[in-house]
Amino acid sequence: QVQLVESGGGLVQAGGSLRLSCTASGRAFSTTPMGWFRQAPGKEREFVAAISSRSSMTDYADSVKGRFTISRDNAANTLYLQMNSLKPEDTALYYCAAKIRATYGSPSEEGEYYYWGQGTQVTVSS
């Protein structure tokens, strides 16, 4: 069993920055690819970014490329999402997720992720 707990969300003005964290416990964190997803009010959950177990591969949604950076610290069992140049359309509940298999696979496919956190709210004001 894996428990994922997100933190770092909040209210920020457009153009500002936030860093989200996701702390994992209960399983070998360093062996599993992980990702960030988000869900805005009235919209479906969407892929944001993903990272392989050893950080050798990363992927981003087109909407966040060049502004967001995903990273991980396996020694600390923590996943990060650095968000810069935030826009009002980035407002959403942000979730971290972990795969159950070690293969990177299709990082943007929500169905490939088995464990999910409860989410942290990010609100960007204009």
Image (spheres, helix red, strand yellow):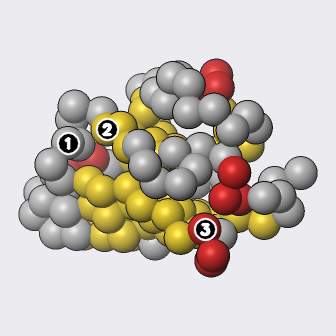
Amino acid type, residue under disc 2 in the picture: Tyr
Res 99 seen here: yes
Which residue in the protein does label 3 denote? 74
Q: Which residue is at a point 32% across and 49% down the rendered structure image? A: 91
Instruction: Mark 2 and mark 3 in contact? Answer it, CB < 8 Å.
Output: no
Real-space CA distance between mark 1 and mark 3, rounded to the nearest whole angstrom: 23 Å
Q: What kind of element bears circle 3?
A: helix
Height in image: 92 above or below 99?
A: below
Real-space CA distance between mark 1 and mark 2, rounded to the nearest whole angstrom: 6 Å
Amino acid type, residue under disc 3 in the picture: Asn
Res 95 seen here: no
Q: What kind of element bears circle 2?
A: strand
Badge 1, how many Cα within 10 Å: few under 14, some, many 20+? few
Height in image: 37 above or below 43?
A: below
Q: What kind of element bears circle 1?
A: loop
Badge 2, how many Cα within 10 Å: few under 14, some, many 20+? many
Q: Earlier in the sequence, mark 2 or mark 3?
A: 2
Real-space CA distance between mark 2 and mark 3, rounded to the nearest whole angstrom: 20 Å
Left or right: 59, with 20 as reference point: left
Instruction: Mark 1 and mark 2 in contact? Answer it, CB < 8 Å.
Output: yes
Which residue in the protein does label 1 denote? 65
Height in image: 75 above or below 99?
A: below
Image coordinates for residue 69, horizontal then vertical, percent: 30, 56
Which residue in the protein does label 2 denote? 60
Q: Earlier in the sequence, mark 1 or mark 2?
A: 2
Image coordinates for residue 31, horizontal then vertical, percent: 69, 51
Amino acid type, residue under disc 1 in the picture: Lys
Badge 3, how many Cα within 10 Å: few under 14, some, many 20+? some
Instruction: Mark 1 and mark 3 in contact? Answer it, CB < 8 Å.
Output: no
2 vs 3, front mark: 3
